[in-house]
């Protein structure tokens, strides 16, 4: 129970940090997002909203520039073809988490200002095939972090 309280308190404190804006805003946003996808992540239940919802049902996720999202579950042993998970919010969050953990983050600059990131995930222990590439602008990253935080908070109240 103490872990659950710590996780929700952490999420609520992170929401306050997301309101902070200055010349290091993108760094703060990235740090907050990192904390939100890494720390309470193990507590999500893939069978509950919003984690079990298909990403196309979430307007925020539809608005992202996502050239690739095919969450690989494994490979068919007979054909060596990939087997995919459904494209749920939980699968998306898991790929974001793994991409961050694998340091597959590419900063984006416009007019010498750090104002976005690209996160990729590579599947498997050999980090081979890419199954996620998503581009976040500064505003989208803030909205995404707030969406994740609010989802954790709502799930904890059930």
Image: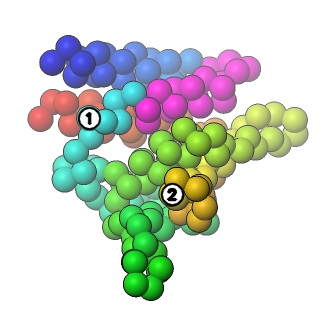
Image: 114 above or below 119: above
Q: Is residue 47 left or right of residue 19?
A: left
Residue 95 falls inside the magenta stretch: no
Q: Is residue 111 left or right of residue 7?
A: right
Residue 37 falls inside the magenta stretch: yes
Residue 9 in the image: state x and y as whole percent: 31, 16
Image: 79 above or below 13: below
Q: Is residue 20 left or right of residue 74?
A: right
Rendered-image quadrant of the C terminus? top left
Q: Say which mark, if any, is on residue 124.
A: 2
The mark lying in front, picked from 2 and 1, is 2
Sort mark 1 into few (<14), some (14-19) or many (20+) by Cα contacts within 10 Å: few
Along the viewing direction, whichever of 39 and 154 lies nearer the viewer: 39
Residue 73 in the image: state x and y as whole percent: 39, 64
Mark 2 and mark 1 lie on one chain; the one further toward the N terminus is 1
Write down the quadrant of residue 58 in the picture.
bottom left
Along the viewing direction, whichever of 61 and 38 lies nearer the viewer: 38
Residue 3 in the image: state x and y as whole percent: 24, 18
Image: 21 above or below 110: above
Image: 62 above or below 118: below
Residue at screen point 34% across, 67% down:
86
Q: Residue furthest left?
A: 158
Q: Which residues are magenta?
A: 21-38
Which residue is disc 1 drawn over? Answer: 43
């Amino acid at each position: 129970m103490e872990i659950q309280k710590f996780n929700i308190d952490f999420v609520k404190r992170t929401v306050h940090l997301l309101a902070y804006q200055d010349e290091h805003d993108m760094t703060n946003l990235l740090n907050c997002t990192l904390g939100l996808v890494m720390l309470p992540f193990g507590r999500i239940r893939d069978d509950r909203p919003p984690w079990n919802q298909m990403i196309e049902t979430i307007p925020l996720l539809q608005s992202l520039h996502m050239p690739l999202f095919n969450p690989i579950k494994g490979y068919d042993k007979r054909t060596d073809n990939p087997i995919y998970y459904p494209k749920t919010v939980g699968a998306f969050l898991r790929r974001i988490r793994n991409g961050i953990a694998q340091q597959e983050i590419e900063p984006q600059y416009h007019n010498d200002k750090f104002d976005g990131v690209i996160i990729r995930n590579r599947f498997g222990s050999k980090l081979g095939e890419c199954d996620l590439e998503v581009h976040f602008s500064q505003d989208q990253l803030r909205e995404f972090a707030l969406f994740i935080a609010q989802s954790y908070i709502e799930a904890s109240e059930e």
